[in-house]
Image (tube, grey):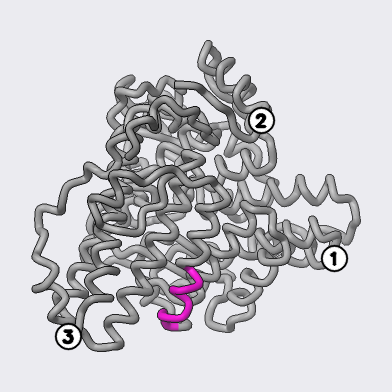
Amino acid sequence: MKSNYKRNTIVVNIVLFTLLMFNSCDRFTDVGLPKSQITRDLVFKDDELAKSAMAAVYRSVYETGFISGGNSGAQILYSTYADELQSYASATSDATIFYQLSHLASSTKINSLWTTTYSQLYNINSIIEGVENSENLSLDVKNRLKGEALFLRSILHLYLVQAYGEIPYVNSTSYEVNQIIGKSSVNTVYGLCKADLQAAVNLLPATLPAGNRIYPTKMAAYTVLARIAYYEKNWEDAVQYSSVVITNTLYKMETDLNKVFLKDSSGSIFQLLPFNSTSSTSQGNVFILNTAPPTNVALRQDFVNEFETGDGRRTSWIGQKTDSQGKIYYYPYKYKQYSTAASSTEYSVVLRVEELYLIRAEAYIQKNQYDLAVADLNKIRTRAGLSSLAGTSDQIFLNSALIKERRSELFTEFGHRFFDLRQHDLLDIVMTTRKPTGNRISDYCRYQKKNCFSIPI
């Protein structure tokens, strides 16, 4: 990276990862090679070896990083940092550090998330280049692997830009190129993400049957395009891309809430495979409480209290455990398998169709198509066992209903709640009323009066 990088003003979008940018930006390419690295010439002479290299990338993103459901991923950090989870872990744990807003540049997770993601991107780019330069792979395998790699490159950069603001968009393994690469603006990164996704659409299969959605498809690419449109507030694209998936008859919301996170759920769009056929998901291992009080994380009491009476998500997706003193602790129970089992019935759900109904509902609200917005919100509400909203043109009411449904539907899923609070300019209100008080809160609130902030370094 350019040597004058640290003399520039760094613009970031959220506080929790600001210090990571300070500490790691000038060495993001120092990621090394995977320990199991096989020479590219050998790997991309054989279809099965090439697919094995791609499988290693999937294993990496499942184990750690932005879309990992375990303690080493970002899911716990976002949920504890916002207003979903409370940490009961030690004072030095990542969960507690982020829950208390006491993260420092020296925090292990601050350093590792950045380098982990760019390491994953290096390996993804290596696959793209290997596939493109190979004369031995079958056309079907070349198209599939390149499409999957482009999809993963896009979604990882999307999480990076949502976390840090301006970032380098890395699409090469060249040491010379990456040593001089500079930051790209948020809008530029969005554009590059969209270009990768559009290229992936031309290479990926249209759909996969339920139970086998552990690889991206055109529907997965359209889902991420819809999410980008939501972040950009490009409501026409949000409707267009959401509708492509919603109208596909293979991708339908499960009527039974207990089936939403099963591996064969019809509403799942993209999933990550656990370690083997008898392993539970990382989320099941992390969230389910077998003893009380918790030793890691549990749902905040105020979060549990704010579900509407009769909301099936409260009864189906939230478990509870009582300690010896009679105190009840609540935990996310979307994933119901803990540790090993006779057979794994759940996969880690990264993308699901319910998000698209919520994206499209917001787009309709912003386009003043209120009846259509209400119809999409009611799809979510009636599935949860709640009464339908009446038709209305009250945009303030609909915005409030939308935010509430997003919170109840997508809780503890890869940072949705935090990103939604920022998207709707609610960070100050929520963080000042629900988080521990102290100097770091006052700093946080001062910065968040704008959508982003500048700190000279």
Q: Quadrant of the N terminus?
A: top left
Q: Earlier in the sequence, mark 1 or mark 3?
A: 3
What is the number of the mark on residue 420?
Answer: none
Tell me where residue 327 appears, x and y as whole percent. Answer: 46, 27
Name the front one of labels 2 and 3. 3
Of the 4 image quadrants, the one containing the C terminus is top left
Expressed as whole percent of the image width and height from the top left, the position of residue 282 reads: 31, 51
Tell me the crowding category of disc 1: few under 14, some 14 to 19, or many 20 or more residues within 10 angstroms, Cα based.
some
Check the image and report above or below for 141 versus 430.
Answer: below
Disc on the earlier residue, 1 or 2: 1
User: What is the magenta range?
Assistant: 197-205
- The local crowd at label 3, few if under 14, some if 14 to 19, many if 20 or more residues have their Cα within 10 Å, is few
Q: Residue 124's image quarter?
A: bottom left
Q: Residues within 10 Å of mark 2 (few under 14, many from 20)?
A: few
Q: Which residue is mark 2?
A: 450
Label 1 sits on what residue type?
Asp
Q: Nearer the viewer, residue 301 or 69?
A: 69
Q: Amino acid at mark 3?
A: Asn
Please give the residue where the numbered disc 1 appears in the rendered image.
371
Viewer-proximal residue among 189 and 447:
189
Q: Residue furthest right?
A: 393
Label 3 belongs to which residue? 136
Q: Position of residue 222 (x, y in %)?
A: 54, 70
Question: Residue 251 location in percent, x, y?
Answer: 54, 77
Is residue 162 shown to the viewer in this render?
yes
Query: Please, what secondary structure does the residue beneath circle 2 have?
Result: loop
Q: CA distance from mark 1 to mark 3?
A: 54 Å
Q: CA distance from mark 1 to mark 2?
A: 32 Å
Question: Residue 43 sits in which quadrant?
Answer: bottom left
